[in-house]
Amino acid sequence: MDPRPTTSSAEHDIAADLVAVLVAVTSGDPRVLTIQDQRALPSGPFELAHRSLQSGLRAWVERQTRLPLGYVEQLYTFADRDRADATGKHVISISYLGLTREQPALGEHEARWRCWYDYFPWEDHRAGPPPLIEQALRPGLRAWIAAASDRAAQRGRRQRAAMLFGLEDHAWNEELVLQRYELLYEAKLIPEAHRGNSQAFELGDTVRPAAPGKPMMLDHRRILATGIARLRAKIKYHPVVFELMPDTFTLLQLQRCVEALAGRQVHKPNFRRLIEQQELVEETGETSQEAGGRPAKLFRFRRTVLAERAISGTKLPISGA
């Protein structure tokens, strides 16, 4: 029985939900702000009292976390036809990406910062491909491939899995975060794909455990995947990474921040050469005693560079190591 309202007026009811992917990088750890036992992103409905969508988002985030929002950009609008709430209203989620520096969060929903690799452990390749891809994901993917209806479909599934997860000599593309998540959803290897049975899913005649990674409420992990993918792409052509840095920093701290976001190692000499060529930073004349090393120069971001010229075509040298 279809639980949705049958009256013509109810069928056209639409509710707008505002969702924030709020990111910080702390000690080389990419962090995302969560609520409700770390199972959801800060969110709330758009209300008529809100002056704009963004002002509504800021109001909800500040109410739920007691943190003011800094840099914010609209991320994506999720409007799938099957998104409905308990009243039958069609729910549109309008998501935003925010960048900040971590500070204690309070609010009414137990706001907590958490490493985004807790939700997507297969995305962290800073030390090389994580063993869990081979040990935990690949068996489930093999079963999903084998369950396809015919050989052509099996071949298509195999090619998709290999391309997205860097298998069979395919290179890992750090920007395909959302596509990887959606493939795991399609393969029913994550709890969100089959609510009510979060431990295992039927794949043909076999039962496979859920993929590693903390699930989230509704489609919030999909929204988080979209935010990570956007940020990984954006740091290569726009200096948004400096929104995550303190006022002064060393070049190693900047490098570690980029690596945390990209989930990949950066080629150190090329990275420093790029930063110098783009004139993105300037020395402060002070130094910092980095752990286990000699004093390192402190730099600050040259915000005037944005007004002086557009920075385009910049490709951060993310290595395949």
Image (cartoon, rainbow, N blue to C red):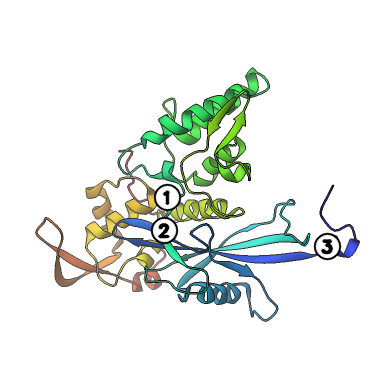
Q: Look at 31% across and 71% down and name the residue there.
A: 302
The residue pinned by badge 1 equals 118
State left or right for residue 53 relative to residue 236: right
* Alpha-carbon span between mark 2 and mark 1: 7 Å
Q: Quadrant of residue 217?
A: bottom right
- Percent from the top left, x then y, of residue 154? 60, 22
Mark 1, residues whose alpha carbon is within 10 Å: few (<14), some, or many (≥20)? some
Q: Which residue lies furthest to the left in this view?
A: 294
Q: Look at 64% across and 79% down and name the residue there.
A: 50
Q: Are marks 3 and 2 in contact (CB under 8 Å)?
A: no
Q: Do the residues labelled 1 and 3 touch (CB within 8 Å)?
A: no
Q: Look at 54% across and 43% down and name the residue there.
A: 181
- Percent from the top left, x then y, of residue 244? 36, 65
The residue pinned by badge 3 equals 12
Query: Looking at the picture, does residue 141 appear above or below residue 316?
Result: above
Element type at mark 2? strand
Count of marks overlaid on the render:
3
On residue 114, the disc is: 2
Element type at mark 1? helix
Looking at marks 1 and 3 on the same chain, the residue that comes earlier in the sequence is marked by 3
Element type at mark 3? loop
State left or right for residue 122 relative to residue 20: left
- Percent from the top left, x then y, of residue 8? 90, 61
